[in-house]
Image: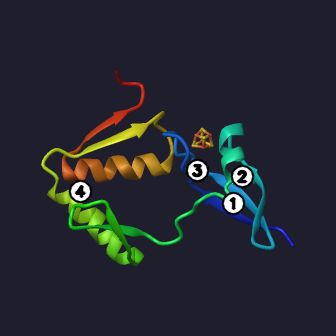
Amino acid sequence: MVEIVKNVVCPFCGCLCDDIEIMVEDGHIVGTRNACRIGHAKFMHFEGSVRYTEPLIRENKKDDFKKTDYDTAIEESARLLVESKLPLLYGFSSIGCEAQREAILIGEKIGAIVDNTATV
Ligand code: SF4
């Protein structure tokens, strides 16, 4: 039986399309809806590639990472943003989806610069 997972955010490009539907059967992705050809291909061919299944946190500002839980990862991410002197939220390709709106709202709260990939 095919299960449809709705409102998935595509992580591939800066558009952050957040209305992707993923069809899952027996634990495997068998199709997508609303994704462009690139996004569709990324979802369909991710199996077999390296995939992080747990958040990682940097230790002592070195390139050593240890596994952590999601609550700790979110808390640490928020701390880094709040304590940043001049935060930059970068990479949005086109404005219009809910994921980007949420990022911009966070940016307003922390006094960030928000930029997109079209800037040179
Ligand atoms: S435009 Fe395509 S690749 Fe980019 S986020 Fe949307 S579905 Fe993914």
Q: Which residue, given by chain and number where applicable, does mark 1 sit on?
A: 48
Q: Residue 81, which numbered label?
A: 4
Residue type at mark 4: give it. Leu
Q: Which one is earlier in the sequence, the residue at label 2 or at label 4?
A: 2
User: Residues under labels 2 and 4: Cα distance?
Assistant: 33 Å
Label 4: state its secondary structure. Answer: helix
Query: For this rendering, which residue is in front, 67 or 89?
Result: 67
Residue at 43%, 38% (x, y): give it.
92
**Number of the front mark, 4 or 1:** 1
Neighbor class of circle 2 (other Cα within 10 Å; few <14, some 14-19, many 20+) is few
Can you see residue 45? yes
Q: Are marks 3 and 4 in contact (CB under 8 Å)?
A: no
Say whether disc 4 or disc 1 marks the residue closer to the N-terminus. 1
Name the residue that disc number 3 marks: 10
Residue that appears at 57% across and 51% down: 18
Residue 15: % across, % down: 52, 40
Q: Would residue 34 be seen by someone viewing this image from the given angle?
A: no
